[in-house]
Image (tube, helix red, strand yellow):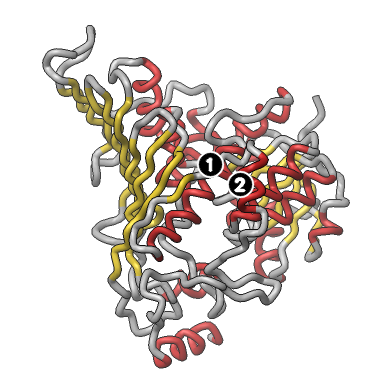
Amino acid sequence: MEKVKIGIFGAGRGIDIAQNLMLLDCEITALCDFNEKRRNEGLKKLGKDVAAYDDFDKFIEHDMDAVVIANYFHEHTPYAIKCFEKNIHVFCECISNGTMAEGVELLRAYEKSNSIYMLAENYPQMIFNREMKKVCDGGTLGQILYAEGEYNHPVTADDIEFNKNYVYFIEHWRNFLPRSYYITHSIAPLMWSTGATPKKVHAFPVYAPFKEKITARRVGDRAAVITTVNDDNSVFKITGCSAFGAHNNTYRICGEKGQIENLRGMGSKIMLRYNEWSVPEGKEEVNLYEPTWNDKDEEFINKAGHGGGDYIIARMFLDCIKAGKEPEHPFDIYSAVTMSSVAILAHRSVLNNGVTYDIPDFRLEECRKEYENDRLTPIHGTDGSKPNIPCSSNPDYTPSEEQIEKMRELLKE
């Protein structure tokens, strides 16, 4: 089989993904980014034979089988749809759609195409999450009843380079991103391990504005504590992207007979525990251990970002293309839109005192009809469109003029 030809849209995160695809013997044919500086930096990492574009429509006319969509967090949908119209496969970062209406549009366009779509969500493939899925699949926990997922990523107030590199203009999406929106790192590992799909959601905020002297962040919340009820009657508690305590990515899955979790501050260590009356053969009541990869590509996995997940998801996408099959739950497009719906509706719950929302099943036309014109968003668009709902649980919160002005001065440097 000829090498799979792939284009990269977004020269930030997209370059990381491209480098893993190159290890899998793919050919990176073109790079598109609207920011000249980032585009040129990306080209240096990819090599001289990669074509460069600042226009997406011209970019997808280039010879390619698939596109990595890694542009701004909330603006993937229109570009994925353009790929579908040309039957180009899509490997998409973060949430699949920024509004509910976009979720409807994305699925309608996908169903008319011959494209494969995969959500490029890497946290399920971290070694401890792979171990959790293995144990869940083994059945020794019994029926899964409850699970927790916490992606906690505080950033120091003094991280000037982060602001310069990742929040590089005042109306950047990171400054307006509700805490519930960056959700896939906390929920996807639970969906993958358990097989469950959320059906209802509500959320409450942890409101505590940052006190740094330089900021344009409009979100005063540190977390959205989100609860979902799922199609198997299990319950998830997740945080989206939180910013309290110490940095960690932690998961816990509880069944009728026992539980498994990775331990905060202890690397990839797993704690697998059973009740004394339900210890399976070959196990102890308490099992503390380091999981192993047992993977033919362990050399590449150990060098890849996000705990090896970057390489594994790239390999999964390539395998789907070669086999002509859709990815498994929760990496498929329907699961991706479900996760986006959880993120969007959890924020609406935050804004409405914790009211519960049904998660629509966009396979059903009646659900699509209900949301096909729902374009509520808390984030600025690169087309000049403005937010039409608050991004914070306190709609009146805003940084001081002094804080914002210092940010403007920083970004001029």
Q: Hey, which residue is sitting farthest left in the picture?
A: 276
In the rendered structure, the answer to whether residue 144 lies left or right of residue 67 reads left
| Residue 45 shows in this picture | no
| Residue 352 shows in this picture | yes
Q: Hey, which residue is sitting farthest top in the picture?
A: 281
| Residue 228 x, y percent position in the rendering | 38, 43
Q: Nearer the viewer, residue 261 or 40?
A: 261
Q: Quadrant of residue 214?
A: bottom left
Circle 1 SS class: helix
Q: Callout 2, which amino acid?
A: Ile
Q: Nearer the viewer, residue 262 or 302?
A: 262
The residue at the point 59 percent across, 60 percent down is 74
Q: Quadrant of residue 128?
A: top left
Residue annotated with mark 1: 310
| Residue 140 x, y percent position in the rendering | 29, 16
| Residue 121 x, y percent position in the rendering | 53, 43
In the rendered structure, the answer to whether residue 316 lies left or right of residue 217 reads right
The residue at the point 53 percent across, 85 percent down is 413
Q: Nearer the viewer, residue 354 or 195?
A: 354
Q: Callout 1, which amino acid?
A: Asp
Above or below residue 100? Residue 88 is above
Residue annotated with mark 2: 17
| Residue 367 x, y percent position in the rendering | 61, 44
In the rendered structure, the answer to whether residue 31 lies left or right of residue 391 reads right
Contact flag, marks 1 and 2 (Cβ < 8 Å): yes
Q: Residues within 10 Å of mark 1 (few under 14, many from 20)?
A: many
The residue at the point 22 percent across, 7 percent down is 281
The residue at the point 52 percent across, 22 percent down is 296
Above or below residue 189? Residue 180 is below
> The N terminus is located in which quarter?
top right
Q: Residues within 10 Å of mark 2 (few under 14, many from 20)?
A: many
